[in-house]
Image (cartoon, grey):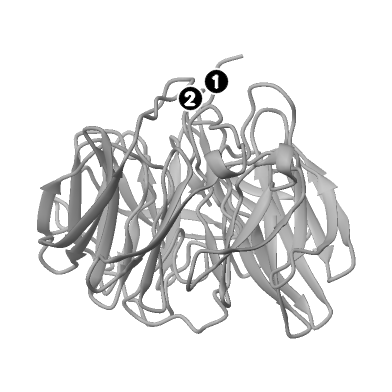
């Protein structure tokens, strides 16, 4: 079996328990970790023949970490030489405002690149980054001053894995929750104090995955959903108490990388979708604070390597398949039943985000596509190829600007109306 190419950290529906603010994309997959922009984000109906206007471009270091944007400031995390470098950038101009970093010796076990995978998290005046060797750091987002740092792989005896640490941390309340994978120390999941970096709690012996965790409120209590190497589980954010878990994943050269997708049910019952390739497939379940109940599962409806589906009006839209084993198809699935509504074959692999009733696809071959999609089908409104390289880092959309990077260049495109 061929090994998967690195899932973009995460790739990854979280709720930071705060309303989305227009113009912000502060973490992996946007304000709520579901790939959907703030409600007041507006996209152009089409693009010029030459593609969206380029506001700026700049060279970047190695890595597949996406860009985070908040308050007019973007944060870039990449590898330059033998250092993982965090940069605060003026979102409007691309100019560096501050820079910090730490040394790294990381080399992937299988293919991929040697740079960081985890998208920075901007929260409450701080930015959290997690490097490929598990170095977790907290910086002041305005100045770049390092506030604290932990070497999670070394401290908790966690292996680097095929491609390095790839699960973007999650901030819930006063804790930074990390899918560390320190199985030997019962430190599969570790919570760090947001203010000091001190260990707040550790739980499970689960190996780490590349899937970003998400936050969810249940009866007024903050929880977090994690997809680990072999399980999907719900933990109470304040204590680390595991409320329930079910098997998800497979031994061997497989990867869990898509972010869990949470959909509202009624007041006491929510819906959850987890998905992966490699013959694992999807599980769609109802859940509360006590248990999860599978409603449908399998590989026929959806089995995507790291593209987190977009949910709209009860429809799941995702790029089905694997980056490293084409072809890949764009697919719409009825969430409640798992019934496939339509398939656009040979679409090519990539990631999706949503705003203003439209979808933006960033394909690994460098193409961007602006689309509309619903239960009846999809329509491409515009296409462009602004970058020559491979796009695997998750893009960011903030205040009408789309931030996309390939292996060497970060570009800012004007896509708003």
**Mark in the foreground, 1 or 2:** 1
CB under 8 Å between callouts 1 and 2?
yes
Please report the residue visible at 17 percent of the width from the left and 52 percent of the height from the top.
Answer: 51
**In the figure, 404 relative to 398: above or below?**
above
Residue under pointer 2: 324
**In the figure, 215 relative to 310: above or below?**
below
Q: Toward which corner of the image does residue 335 lie, by quadrant?
A: bottom right
Mark before the other along the chain sequence, 1 or 2: 1
Q: Nearer the viewer, residue 314 or 220?
A: 220
Give the side of residue 229 with respect to residue 386, left or right.
right
User: Which quadrant is the C terminus positioned in?
Assistant: bottom left
Q: Position of residue 338 (x, y in %)?
A: 75, 51
Q: Position of residue 177 (x, y in %)?
A: 59, 61
Please report the residue visible at 26 percent of the width from the left and 33 percent of the height from the top.
Answer: 82
Secondary structure at numbered mark 1: loop
Please report the residue visible at 40 percent of the width from the left and 73 percent of the height from the top.
Answer: 356
Residue under pointer 1: 3
Give the side of residue 271 with respect to residue 362, left or right.
right
Q: CA distance from mark 1 to mark 2?
A: 8 Å
């Amino acid at each position: 079996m061929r090994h998967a190419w690195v899932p973009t950290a995460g790739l990854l529906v979280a709720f930071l328990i705060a309303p989305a603010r227009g113009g912000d994309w502060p973490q992996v997959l946007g304000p709520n970790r579901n790939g959907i922009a703030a409600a007041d984000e507006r996209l152009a109906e089409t693009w010029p023949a030459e593609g969206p206007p380029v506001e700026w471009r700049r060279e970047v270091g190695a890595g597949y970490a996406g860009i985070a944007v908040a308050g007019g400031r973007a944060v870039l995390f990449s590898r330059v030489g033998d250092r993982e470098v965090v940069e605060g950038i003026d979102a409007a101009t691309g100019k560096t405002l501050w820079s910090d970093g730490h040394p790294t010796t990381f080399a992937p076990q299988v293919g991929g690149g040697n740079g960081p995978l985890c998208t920075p998290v901007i929260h409450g005046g701080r930015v959290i980054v997690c490097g490929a060797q598990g170095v977790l750091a907290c910086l002041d987002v305005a100045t770049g001053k390092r506030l604290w740092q932990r070497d999670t792989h070394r401290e908790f005896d966690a292996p680097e894995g095929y491609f390095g640490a790839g699960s973007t941390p999650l901030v819930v309340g006063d804790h930074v929750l990390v899918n560390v994978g320190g199985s030997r120390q019962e430190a599969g999941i570790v919570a760090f104090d947001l203010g000091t970096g001190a260990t707040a709690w550790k739980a499970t012996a689960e190996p780490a995955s590349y899937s970003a965790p998400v936050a969810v409120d249940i009866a007024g209590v903050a929880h977090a959903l994690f997809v680990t190497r072999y399980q999907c589980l719900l933990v109470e954010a304040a204590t680390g108490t595991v409320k329930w878990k079910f098997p998800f994943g497979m031994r061997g050269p497989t990867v869990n990388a898509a972010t869990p997708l949470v959909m509202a049910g009624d007041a006491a019952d929510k819906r959850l979708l987890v998905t992966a390739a490699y013959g694992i497939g999807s599980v769609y379940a109802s859940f509360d604070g006590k248990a999860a109940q599978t409603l449908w599962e399998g590989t026929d409806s959806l089995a995507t390597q790291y593209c987190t589906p977009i949910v709209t009006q009860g429809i799941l839209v995702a790029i089905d398949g694997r980056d490293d084993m084409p072809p890949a198809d764009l697919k719409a699935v009825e969430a409640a039943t798992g019934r496939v509504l339509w398939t656009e074959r040979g679409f090519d692999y990539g990631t999706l985000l949503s705003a203003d009733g439209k979808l933006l696809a960033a394909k690994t071959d460098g193409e961007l596509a602006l689309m509309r999609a619903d239960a009846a089908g999809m329509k491409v409104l515009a296409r462009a190829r602004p970058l020559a390289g491979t796009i695997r880092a998750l893009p960011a959309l903030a205040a009408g600007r789309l931030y996309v990077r390939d292996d060497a260049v970060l570009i800012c495109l004007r896509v708003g109306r």
